[in-house]
């Protein structure tokens, strides 16, 4: 059974859910804003074999606005130190970086919203998942914050705008700044909640399904290596 921490009601597992069901992996959602105190009063972590932390509009450095993020970080720390498999998407990746001692901050190149190229690094070429996408891949982005690379983490994807797009840690943790899970319907929902011009909306959705067709298998691959064939 996997624990899935959801930081926004409109940011679910998307395509990752398809992969979990393909491999008959059970999971449970928990909405993080319900963590109004010690996480131990709400969640028994011992019942879960792995963890997924999804995205959200919150910023890691705004715990004064979102105090429950401190509990999310405690949960992450527990899974990481227990060597259980962990996947972080967008905000989830930033929380992982922060738990591992890295700084999270507003990106000086502005927001990335829509489809962008990321480059697979030399270490990414050695990665069991990302090596298949060398030398670069087009990914769906929706973020304004970024992070420094944690000590002992391995950068596997980078870009011209932001140095740290994806990293692994101790082989049982994948942290992805971009979204591999967002369906077309999800993207349309996010757009409805945003104040974009018609041109911006069209640019975000342009060739969406065509772009995702090229990388959709990454969901299966990450789920397989992290949560099924999790031997390291």
Image (cartoon, rainbow, N blue to C red):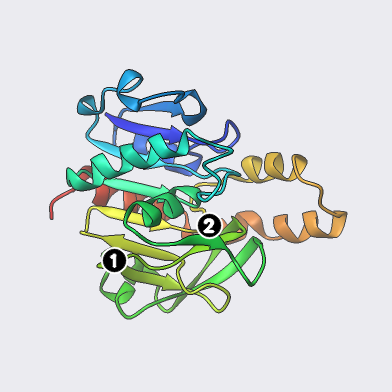
**25 and 70: which is toward the camera:** 70
**Residue that protrudes farthest toward the front in the picture:** 64
Q: Position of residue 107 (x, y in %)?
A: 59, 66
Q: Which residue appears at 62% of the width and 59% of the height?
A: 144
In this picture, is 93 found above or below 136? above
Check disc 1 and report its element: helix, strand or loop: loop
Check disc 2 and report its element: helix, strand or loop: helix
For label 1, count other residues whose C-alpha is less than 10 Å away and answer few (under 14), some (14-19) or many (20+): some
Residue 160, located in which quarter of the rendered image?
bottom right
- Is the residue under label 2 in contact with that under label 1 (CB below 8 Å)? no
Residue 110's disc number = none
What residue is pinned by disc 1? Answer: 153
Q: Position of residue 74 (x, y in %)?
A: 32, 39
Q: Which residue appears at 51% of the width and 75% of the height?
A: 159
Q: From the viewer's perspective, is 94 left or right of 78?
A: right
- The earlier-in-sequence mark between 1 and 2 is 1
Residue 201, located in which quarter of the rendered image?
bottom right
**43 and 221: which is toward the camera:** 43
In this picture, is 3 found above or below 15? above
Residue 213's disc number = 2
Q: Which residue appears at 56% of the width and 46% of the height?
A: 62
Q: From the viewer's perspective, is 41 left or right of 135?
A: left
For label 2, count other residues whose C-alpha is less than 10 Å away and answer few (under 14), some (14-19) or many (20+): few
Q: Position of residue 6 (x, y in %)?
A: 48, 34
């Amino acid at each position: 059974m996997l624990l899935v921490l959801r930081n926004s009601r409109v940011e679910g597992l998307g395509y990752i859910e398809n992969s979990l069901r393909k491999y008959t992996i059970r999971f449970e959602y928990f909405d993080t804003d319900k963590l109004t105190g010690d996480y131990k009063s709400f969640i028994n972590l011992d019942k879960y074999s792995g963890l997924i932390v999804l995205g959200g509009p919150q910023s890691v450095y705004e715990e004064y606005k979102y105090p429950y993020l401190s509990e999310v970080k405690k949960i992450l720390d527990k899974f990481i130190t227990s060597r259980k498999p962990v996947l972080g998407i967008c905000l989830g990746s930033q929380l992982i970086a922060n738990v591992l001692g890295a700084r999270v901050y507003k990106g000086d190149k502005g927001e990335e919203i829509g489809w962008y190229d990321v480059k697979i690094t030399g270490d990414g070429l050695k990665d069991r998942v990302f090596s298949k996408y060398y030398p670069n891949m087009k990914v769906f982005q929706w973020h304004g914050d970024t992070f420094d690379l944690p000590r002992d983490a391995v950068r596997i994807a980078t870009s011209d705008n932001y140095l740290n797009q994806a990293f692994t840690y101790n082989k049982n943790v994948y942290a992805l700044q971009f979204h591999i899970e967002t369906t077309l319907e999800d993207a349309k929902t996010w757009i409805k909640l945003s104040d974009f011009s018609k041109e911006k909306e069209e640019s975000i959705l342009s060739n969406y399904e065509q772009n995702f067709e090229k990388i959709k298998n990454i969901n299966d691959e990450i789920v397989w290596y992290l949560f099924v064939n999790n031997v390291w």
